Image: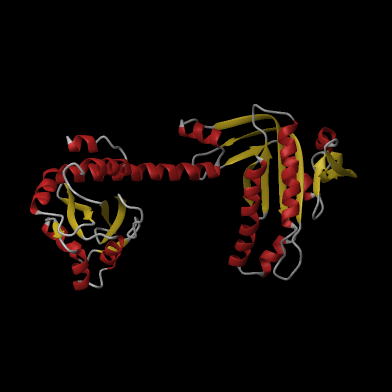
Amino acid sequence: ELMREINMGLLFDEVMDKAYETLRLVLPYNRLSVALLDDGGQLAHARWARSDYSEMKLRTGYSGRLKGSSLQEIISSGEPRIISDLAAYLEAHPDSASTRLMVAEGIRSSLTCPLIATGKPIGFMFFSSRTPDTYKDAHIDIFKLIAGQLSIVLEKSNLYQQILQEKEKSDRLLLNVVPARIANRLRAGEQPVVENFPEINIFFADIVAFTEFASRYPPDQVVDFLQNIFVRIDRLCDKCGVEKIKTIGDEYMVISGSPDSAGDVHLRNLLDFALQVRSFVEGFQYPDGRPVKIRIGMHTGRAVAGVIGQKKFAYDIWGDAVNVASRMESSGEAGRIHVTGEIYARLNNEFLFEERGTILVKGKGPMRTYFLTARK
């Protein structure tokens, strides 16, 4: 009945929470903890602990080498060990850091049991009491009745929890590469994944004089410089509700909008984002003291996006609107936000613009463009 109750847990932490409540019916303890073997069985790693008192000094994450320790003897013999007076044990073994922490918690006696699943040692379960001389041979007999099945349950639940953690990690990595809606389609096996944007707002930014800086300074300093700037721009993306697409060298690309949405709210978000990026970058300096300037270009229009290929794939966006936004950046000026007439026409009642005049844009011919300066 005890094992049936414990086995109702699925993840390791769930199983141990059930074990903590259930095993108290037949074994005395103020603290129950588990250490699992790691590093090919050479390391004992504190995996789980729970007590009926407030502060535990020996916490999960603590680890120690098995070789030469008393735990190695327990694994070798396969027999549980009782320590009736932990304070006296510490006096005899003053180098035992884990015992010192347990005594500091108020633990006075312990029952240490090996966990062996299908003949393979996987770790230890520690029953600990704040009262001396708590554990007897009868308690060892009780544990042995459930030891094999309990060890198997713990091993399976730990493996399952590791699998879930790895899946969560891979999901986070995927969401760092593609939007959530694209990730869902990729998980479903859809190939290729394509989106049509009847209207999308596009932002390009380039750090002025970066190429010269990169040619003069060590690679690690160049990478640190970009990291300091781009990590903060990433945070601004989240704050303003816009979507980073990619970086290529010192160029940073962002979009705002979705395939099924239009309207000024997404464009407004992108203009606010551009103003904040420019303001933020103005606080940086190159190592020689020169102020860092950023050149920004923006446009709005139709585009297509998606994920192409199977190896080293990335979410990207294509179309004439993308090309125009890129031209706005490359033909702009340092420290300024260069936008098209389409953006000016839609939001000149909410933002301040400075007319640049008509310029010749590669692939488009003459275009009247503007510099975004501030919010009204």
Residue at 23%, 57% in the rendered image: 130
Along the line of sight, the residue nearer the viewer: 241 or 69: 69
Compared with 2, 61 (above or below) is below
Compared with 289, 38 (above or below) is above
Residue 13 screen position, x and y as percent: 32, 44
291 left or right of 188?
right
Along the line of sight, the residue nearer the viewer: 369 or 18: 18
Across the whole image, how many numbered discs are drawn on residues?
Answer: 0
Is residue 156 at least partly visible in the picture? no
259 left or right of 52?
right
Q: Quadrant of residue 83?
A: bottom left
74 left or right of 243?
left
Residue 121 screen position, x and y as percent: 19, 53
Q: Residue lying furthest top in this view?
A: 260
Q: Is the N terminus in the top left, top right, bottom left or bottom right quadrant?
A: top left
Is residue 270 at least partly visible in the picture? yes
325 left or right of 150?
right
Q: Quadrant of residue 93?
A: bottom left
Q: Residue lying furthest front in this view?
A: 131
Along the line of sight, the residue nearer the viewer: 215 or 96: 96
Residue at 24%, 73% in the rendered image: 94
Structure colour scheme: secondary structure
Q: Is the C terminus in the top left, top right, bottom left or bottom right quadrant?
A: top right
Residue 175 screen position, x and y as percent: 52, 41
Residue 34 screen position, x and y as percent: 26, 52
Residue at 26%, 44% in the rendered image: 20
Along the line of sight, the residue nearer the viewer: 265 or 16: 16
Residue at 79%, 45% in the rendered image: 328
Compared with 367, 280 (above or below) is below
